[in-house]
Each structure stands twice: as C-alpha cells, then as structure tokens.
Amino acid sequence: MWRKDGNWNSRHGSAGFATRIPTSQGVRPLKRFGYPSNAAAEAAAEAVGKLLDLAADDDTVRAKVGDMIQEKTRRGGTLPAAEDVRRRLGLSQDPGSAGITFGAAWAEWLTGNKRLRASARRRLEGIGAHWLLPVLADVPLERLTGAHCVAVFDRIERVNAEIAAQRAASRALVKAEGDVRQRPKLVGIASQHRVFAALRTVCNFEVRVTHRLAFNPVYAVMLEPEETPEAERWSAAEAGRFLAACADDALVLMFRVAVLRGPRRGELVGFRWSASDLDAGYLGVGKTI
C-alpha cells in the first residue's frame, strides 16, 4: 500500500496483467497495471496476444512486435489496432511506425518530385490546396480508403451547387462555404479529371515506391467521362478574311500570331522579349498569364 519513500501507492487495488513476451533482447516480462476493472485488464492482455499472433510464424517479426508492445505500453501508452499492425506487416513496414498523414505524404511527394516542370508544380500545388488537402490532410495515409477519395469529389459537387445557386439568385458576391479559392468558379468535368489524375498519381507512388499503401483507393471514384467536342476550325479563306478585316487594328500582330501559330490564350499575352529572338524567328513564353 505504501511505497518505500513513504508515499501512498495510488495503483494499489487497480487491475492489471503480467506476462512474458518475445523481444529483440530475448523473452522479457511485461507487467501493466492501473486498469479500472478486471475486464479492462483482460481486454488489454488479449490485445497483446492478438498483436503477437500476427507474426506467429516468424520469430524475427514477432520480436519486432514485442518491442513495439513494450514501447507503446510504457508510461500508459496505448497499443495500435491489430488491423493497422497487420496492414503494416503486410507491406513490410515497421509494426511500430507512427504512420504519416496524407497531407504530409502529399508534401513529401511534391517536394521530392524533381522532374516536375514549374507550370506542372504550380498546377499540382493548386489542386492540393483547393481540393485534396481540405478533405484528406489529416487522414492517416495507411487508412486512406475509397470513401475518403469519393469525399473529395462530393465536396467539389457541393461547391459547384452552391456557386450555381448563388449565380441563379443574382448574388453580387459569390462565395461557397469551404471554398478556399480567391475567385470561386464552377469546376468542370475536365478539371475534376485533373484532380482525379493528381490523386491517382500520388497514391500509385505510395503503392509502388514507398509501399505505404496496399492498393490505390482512388478507383472507387466514378466520374462522368471527359468528352471534348471537336473544335471548329476556320478554313484558309476564312482566316484570310479575318486578318484582312483587322489589318488596321492596334492588336493585329497578336491576332496574326493567334491565327497562324495557335498559342493558348495565356501564352498569347505572355510573350516576353527576354525569351524571344526575332532574328531566329521565334517568340518565347516565360510564364503564362
């Protein structure tokens, strides 16, 4: 009842369990007390047994699980769920790994992908900030499921519905709840497919390279097909009539470049002298606008 230093032992009378478990240092005693009831102590002892049973046929892995149990239960810590440990062992991971959130994994992947062009990096950063991280940032990566991925696109549909309703009501300031973009606008099917592709890519990386995912859950998402209508093109005669009609316009040079060379709109207004060489016959775009 009393400790050697004269203080009352607050654990006196509490429930607990004692056993011996395999560790990397050999078979070691494991004693844990302080449970509020015998049932709670028995449940804790059963949890230890279930974790050790996950590696019953492999002494090395069993010892690692034992190390994890000792570390996690020290100073009142809690044991991870058996399903989480089973998943980690199936992926050849440390059973005691603290895991990583999707948000941390996304930042890690984006930072480590040195092959990305600056424009692609900006696009992915926008997709992450606007659509992926608001839903998935705090989700443990190893627990990422198809339902989490579907929730990303459910949120996009909800934002679209709010924006459409506010526009129909002729609202001067359109702002959907939870939309972190500075300039809210509808997210079309093509843009949703870009979000899907970004999520698919990072999950494939986690499956094939880091092995922190057993499978890619993004395929639970079923989007409408992305159908791009065939563009209507001018004939040579129509293009000639247009250029003749705007010959005296101050922007005739921009119109000629648009018709004859076909840049995107953002590129058309993004040409810079520093990236161009008229003697060599080319215009360059440092950054689209």
Image (tube, rainbow, N blue to C red):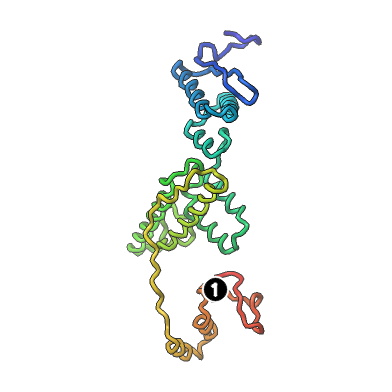
At x 56%, y 29%, the residue is 58
For the question of whether residue 173 can be seen, the reply is: no
List x then y, in percent, for residue 123: 53, 61
The reply to whether residue 85 is in sight is yes
Q: Residue at x 60, y 63 (%)?
A: 118
Comparing 162 with 75, the one in front is 75
Q: Vertical placement of 258 versus 143: above or below? A: below
Whether residue 28 is situated above or below residue 108 in the rendered picture: above
In this view, 274 is above or below 76: below
Which quarter of the rendering shows the N terminus? top right
Question: Which residue sits at x=60%, y=78%?
Answer: 283
Query: Where in the figure is residue 245, as x and y percent of width and height?
Result: 46, 90
Q: Residue at x 47, y 45 (%)?
A: 215
Tell whether 286 sits left or right of 172: right
Numbered marks: total: 1
- Residue 273 x, y percent position in the rendering: 64, 78
Query: Three-letter amino acid code at disc 1?
Result: Glu
Point out residue 43 in the picture as x, y percentages from the top left corner.
46, 21
Does residue 232 appear left or right of residue 99 in this picture? left
Which residue occupies the foreground of this view, 202 or 135?
202
The residue nearer to you, when weighing 287 against 53, is 53
Hey, which residue is sitting farthest front in the picture?
A: 57
Q: Quadrant of the C terminus?
A: bottom right
Q: Would you name the residue on which mark 1 appears?
A: 267
Q: Name above or below for residue 70 compared with residue 164.
A: above
* Label 1 Cα crowd, 10 Å radius (few <14 / some 14-19 / many 20+): some
Q: Secondary structure at mark 1?
A: helix
